[in-house]
Amino acid sequence: MAWTVNVAFIFLVLRLTLAVENFTIPLGHIHNYTQMINNLLRVPKTFYVVGGTFEKDPLMDISPYPFKCGEVEIKQRIGNKVPIERSFLEIADKDPKKRQRLTDKYDLEDQKSPGYNYSNFVDVYRTRSHREFAGSMYLLLSDSLTCALFYNNRYYDCELWVTDKPAREKATNVSFCGAFVTTCNDKTVQWYYNYDDCYKPLK
């Protein structure tokens, strides 16, 4: 799945004028930069999970509710471990006015794929009650500042993170990385901020 995105990205870069001798050197630098997960997780920040190919959170053991209005809060790195809090909006079926955010805590641990000389994915561990492996997330594409596209190898799903909350009714393809979320696998893309409830204050 990651190969599909990488091929699309390579062709995009080639069309952007890397027509110089030995263009593979600058192309390699760009490719490496877009997959260095340490750059993305270097400092605490909040990301909004605006799009993906799953209906329920693949990191939760059993998720009873559809994933909507997702957020990921990156905490301060501790060695090769980055604590995060990941949440989404729960809306009660019997009473839609009852809304709250469901939050889980995780640790992200840096890992390297064979042939890489830098960390390009993280192993994810749930930490709320006891430490439990929740899957691995591969960084397919990122500009290290505003967006990231991940691939979850446990359920073969992709998800799009952005640093700016999208404007109401404009939650599709809201970033450079968003242009590629539809190409990372053959699943239907969901847009998790196409709901008015994402913009209403919790009561």
Image (tube, rainbow, N blue to C red):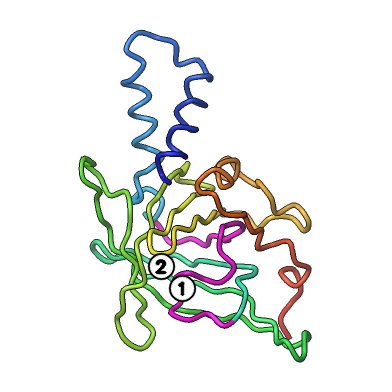
Q: Who's the residue at 62% across and 74% down the image?
A: 66
Residue 83 on image: x %, y %: 36, 70
Residue behind mark 2 = 75
Q: Residue extending furthest top?
A: 21
Q: Relative to 14, is 190 above or below?
A: below
The answer to whether the residues at label 1 and label 2 have Cβ atoms under 8 Å apart is yes
Span of residues in magenta:
43-64
Q: Who's the residue at 78% across and 56% down the image?
A: 169
Alpha-carbon span between mark 1 and mark 2:
8 Å
Residue behind mark 1 = 85
Q: Amino acid at mark 2?
A: Lys
Residue 40 on image: x %, y %: 41, 51
Question: Callout 1 environment at 10 Å: few (<14), some (14 to 19), or many (20+)?
Answer: some
Q: Relative to 80, is 173 above or below?
A: above
Q: Amino acid at mark 1?
A: Glu
Front residue of 45/199: it is: 199
